[in-house]
Amino acid sequence: MNALIESLLQLARANRGQIQHHPVDLSALALDVVDELRQRDPARTVRVSIAEQMTAACDADLVRAVYANLVGNAWKFTSRILEPAIDIGCDGTVYFVRDNGAGFPSDRAEELFRPFARLHDVSEFPGTGIGLTTVQRIIDRHGGRVWAESEPGRGATFSFTLTT
């Protein structure tokens, strides 16, 4: 219940307030999120690659929440993989988080961005079903777009743009 309340509060924060556009070091934000995950789960070994010098004019707190949700999901959905890997990078102005985890059918990707929508059973991969809705709201507020590509058993890539 506490996780659900915290997720709903995060969603509410993503929907209100003035966005502060400043140059932000997205590489540092992603590294901070990964460091927190490693501290919470020190027994776990995950190969994480973060592109250097990723920057964007955006709201640092909101985009940190985007990375917290996307990298957190990649961390969670690689939990049953022998050699888990997460790549965080960009291709021009498209930023992405890619993993080699559980994956899902790509034709159902849009469902993931609806509140409480899940493509995996909560007993397999716990969560509230609010994180990707929060991501979409934050990206929408930045004038960008978010989308996902995946295949069951072959990982997932979540990509987004930020237009300011």
Image: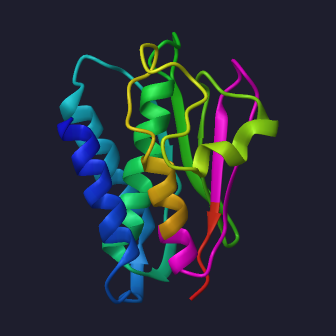
Where the N terminus falls, by quadrant?
top left
Name the residue at 52% across, 36% down: 86
Q: Does residue 107 appear to the left or right of 75 in the view shown?
A: right
Asked whether 105 or 27 is in front, the reply is 105
The image shows residue 148 at horizontal and vertical percentages of 69, 47
Residue 57 among those drawn in magenta: no
Asked whether 152 or 86 is in front, the reply is 152
Name the residue at 43% across, 47% down: 130
Residue 38 lies in quadrant:
top left
The image shows residue 129 at horizontal and vertical percentages of 45, 40
Q: How is the image coloured?
A: rainbow
Asked whether 104 or 58 is in front, the reply is 104
User: Is residue 17 visible in this depiction of the protein?
Assistant: yes
The image shows residue 20 at horizontal and vertical percentages of 35, 89
From which residue to which does the magenta span run? 138-159
Where the C terminus falls, by quadrant?
bottom right
The residue sitting at the right extreme is 107
Name the residue at 75% across, 37% down: 108
